Amino acid sequence: MERIAAWLHEKNPGLEGAIGADEDLIEARLIDSMDFLEFIDLLEEISGSTIDLQDVTIDDFRTLARVRERFFPTSALADASASAG
């Protein structure tokens, strides 16, 4: 998720501090229509999987928590078990 946060900061140079896991990336205009396809490319690169736009909704990209849940389920499980141990 660090690469995603770094990309968001790169696209929004005035953004200070961490991005909350439940912050609405679209409403906060951290991702706009011009950057959306680049964001999908980034997710595909990091996950190693192709994202079929027929299988997703805009809500799958709305927050970092949802992005993690939808596109990185194994990393979410690893994070949960690491924090539980």
Image: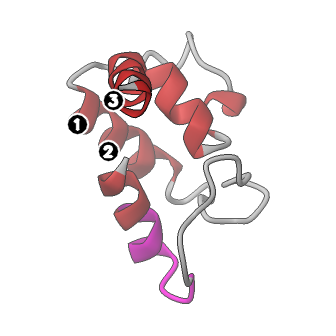
Q: Position of residue 4 (x, y in %)?
A: 38, 53
According to the picture, the residue beneath numbered tag 1 turns out to be 45
The local crowd at label 1, few if under 14, some if 14 to 19, many if 20 or more residues have their Cα within 10 Å, is: few
Question: Tags 1 and 3 in contact by the CB under 8 Å rule?
Answer: no
Circle nearer the N terminus (1, 3) = 1
Choose between 58 and 47: the one closer to the eye: 47
Q: Using the numbered discs, state the Cα–Cα distance from disc 2 to disc 1 in whole angstroms.
A: 5 Å
Question: Tags 2 and 1 in contact by the CB under 8 Å rule?
Answer: yes
Secondary structure of the residue carrying tag 3 is: helix
Residue at the far front in the pictured view: 85
Question: Tags 3 and 2 in contact by the CB under 8 Å rule?
Answer: no
Q: Which residues make up the magenta segment?
A: 7-15
According to the picture, the residue beneath numbered tag 3 turns out to be 82
Displayed quadrant of residue 85: top left
Q: Using the numbered discs, state the Cα–Cα distance from disc 1 to disc 3 in whole angstroms.
A: 24 Å
- The residue at 54%/59% (across/down) is 34
According to the picture, the residue beneath numbered tag 2 turns out to be 42
Image height of 63 relative to 12, above or below: above
- The residue at 61%/31% (across/down) is 66
- The residue at 70%/47% (across/down) is 22
Could you tell me the amino acid type at mark 1? Glu
Closer to the eye: label 1 or 3: 3
